[in-house]
Amino acid sequence: MRTEQVHCILASNAYGHYAVPMSCVHRPASRAILSGGIFEPQTVAFMRENCGDRDIVHAGTFFGDFLPALSAAIAPNAILWAFEPNPESHACATWTLRLNNISNCRLHQAGLGAERGTLPLVTHQMDDLALGGASTFVNRAGRSTCVGVLRVDDAVGERPVGILQLDVEHFEEQALTGALKTIQRNRPIAILETVPSEAWWSKHMTPLGYERVGSVSGNTIFRAKG
């Protein structure tokens, strides 16, 4: 596994070990892990309990705070698909995989969108404070870098997906658009930090039977009925 040199702090919790970027120690996920805790423990528990024998799609990965817990919960032949466009965060997530000897995760240095290509990702505020897991493709003031964008459908191919979890800073609608073939084929549980527009949802998800069934750690959970 190729890894990049990054400035990080090593931390551990009940699930494993982590390379936390030093530039992002102020972020909520970093604070939780550095204190020995779990970030969004209810989300992690829900995903572990509901993944069944199918793959998980997990984005954005940040420094990999979900990776040890999820990789240990999936079935022997399942894959954890992880996506992180921020170069520093991706490098730290790569080290997190290595620290835990995780071999069932496919980590991509890319964001998720409706089309393959490149987009500017805002990684720092105007005062140069690192955004870390809050890095965004949404237009906002700050320092940006161009990164690759993939479609879920292209990345996972015909793999069986049981959970699609997106924490992509208001880019969920675009990421879901690039996952429609996967969704139509698998009807995975969808865990979304931001719910797409009502018009988009009514056109693409309602016909597949998707309904809101709950929430966890500020994320909305949807299942396909019938």
Image (tube, rainbow, N blue to C red):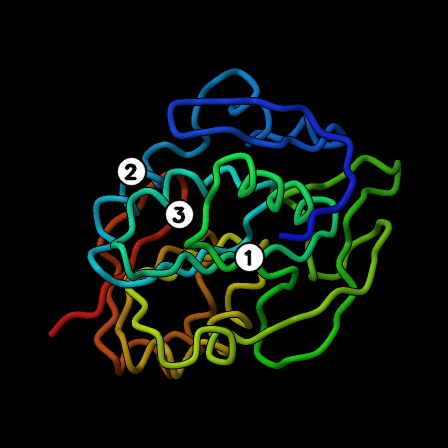
SS label for mark 2: helix
Determine contact: label 3, label 1, CB under 8 Å: no
Label 3 neighbourhood size at 10 Å, few (<14), some (14-19), many (20+)? some
Amino acid type at mark 1: Leu
Label 1 neighbourhood size at 10 Å, few (<14), some (14-19), many (20+)? many
Q: CA distance from mark 1 to mark 2?
A: 21 Å
Quarter placement of the C terminus: bottom left
Q: Residue furthest left?
A: 226
Q: Residue furthest top?
A: 35
Tell me the number on the disc at residue 219: 3
Earlier residue among tags 2 and 3? 2
Where is mark 1, residue-wise? 107
Amino acid type at mark 2: Ala
Amino acid type at mark 3: Asn
Q: CA distance from mark 2 to mark 3?
A: 13 Å
Q: Nearer the viewer, residue 104 or 66?
A: 104
Earlier residue among tags 1 and 2? 2
Vertical placement of residue 4 versus 115, above or below: above
Q: Position of residue 8 (x, y in %)?
A: 71, 29
Vertical placement of residue 150 versus 63, above or below: below
Tell me the number on the disc at residue 22: none
* Eye-nearest disc, 2 or 3: 2
Label 2 neighbourhood size at 10 Å, few (<14), some (14-19), many (20+)? some
Q: Nearer the viewer, residue 45 or 140?
A: 45
Q: Nearer the viewer, residue 206 or 94?
A: 94
Tell me the number on the disc at residue 45: 2
At 70% across and 47% down in the image, what residue appears? 3
